[in-house]
Image: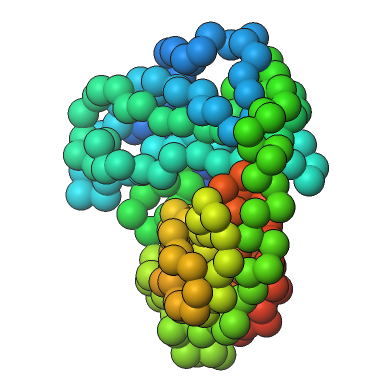
Amino acid sequence: MLDNGLMKFLSSLAALFSGRPSAVSDIDLEIVQFDPPDGSTLLAGEDIKITVQWRHAMRGRGIGIWTKPELPAGVGGGYEGDGGEAHAPGRGRVLRGVSVAEPARLEAVYLIAKDGDSRELFNRRVPVNFTFAVNPEREERRHDGAFSRITGVEVLAPAGELLPIGQHVQVRVGYYARSTHGIRVTAIPVTDADMRYAATAETSDGDGHAMQGFVIGQACVIRHLHVRLLNDSDVAVAEQMVEVDLRFG
């Protein structure tokens, strides 16, 4: 028979590595407010502001907090990155935002925390009921930047070598941009492993390059990067699946 102390210790470990909180977890997150309130209708592209109450005792590790929309297939959207407000142990509140780029229903958001190496510590699906309606202004811009293109992708990390978990990998994306309202660049590894990646990078019209990057939080092999140029309506006006050989462990 295992004594109660050992059982609690094993339960905490299981919760940590599964990404789920337990009754004795060192971290807890809760959504305490949506603005506008749950059940509201917004125009496509408008933000939902989410207030998250947090508590953690992860000394020396720090945590990052995100909310992410559960998007319908083929529908674009976005969310705000971590601002570092909860890196030190304690308790408090942070403000995050999510959006849906096209007319659709939003039925859930994910409340997520990761450590400094992008290992997932907390993941909770929160059901919601928001409606995003047609935004006439965004619809007019959907084809803006249609003649932009990706001109090159360079991964600034050695292919085939074992990279440490938590290493920041930079990606240089060359582009030719032609738009009225601006083009943004993103480069995202295709993987189910815990990770985080840089916010999209703004470009200027004409030839140029933008730096992107990502951090992988567990052992895995990355075979592809999904590189895109997005216009102001979050429509991909150019995209490319780039073959890579990045190994983490």
Q: Residue 139 location in percent, x, y?
A: 70, 38
Q: Residue 55 location in percent, x, y?
A: 30, 26
Q: Do we see residue 192 in this rendering? A: no
- Asked if residue 212 lies left or right of residue 234, the reply is left
- Asked if residue 136 lies left or right of residue 249, the reply is right
In this picture the colour scheme is rainbow
Q: Residue furthest right?
A: 73
| Among the 4 quarters of the image, the one containing residue 88 | top left
Rendered position, 162 above or below 15? below
Residue found 76% across the figure and 36% down from its top: 72
| Among the 4 quarters of the image, the one containing residue 212 | bottom left
Residue found 44% across the figure and 84% down from its top: 156
Residue found 55% across the figure and 28% down from its top: 46
Q: Residue 86 location in percent, x, y?
A: 26, 36
Rendered position, 48 above or below 195? above
Marks counted in the figure total 0
- Asked if residue 215 lies left or right of residue 20, the reply is left
Residue found 62% across the figure and 19% down from its top: 42
Q: Do we see residue 34 in this rendering? A: yes
Q: Residue 206 location in percent, x, y?
A: 50, 74
| Of the pair 68 and 232, the residue shown nearer to us | 232
Rendered position, 29 above or below 79? above
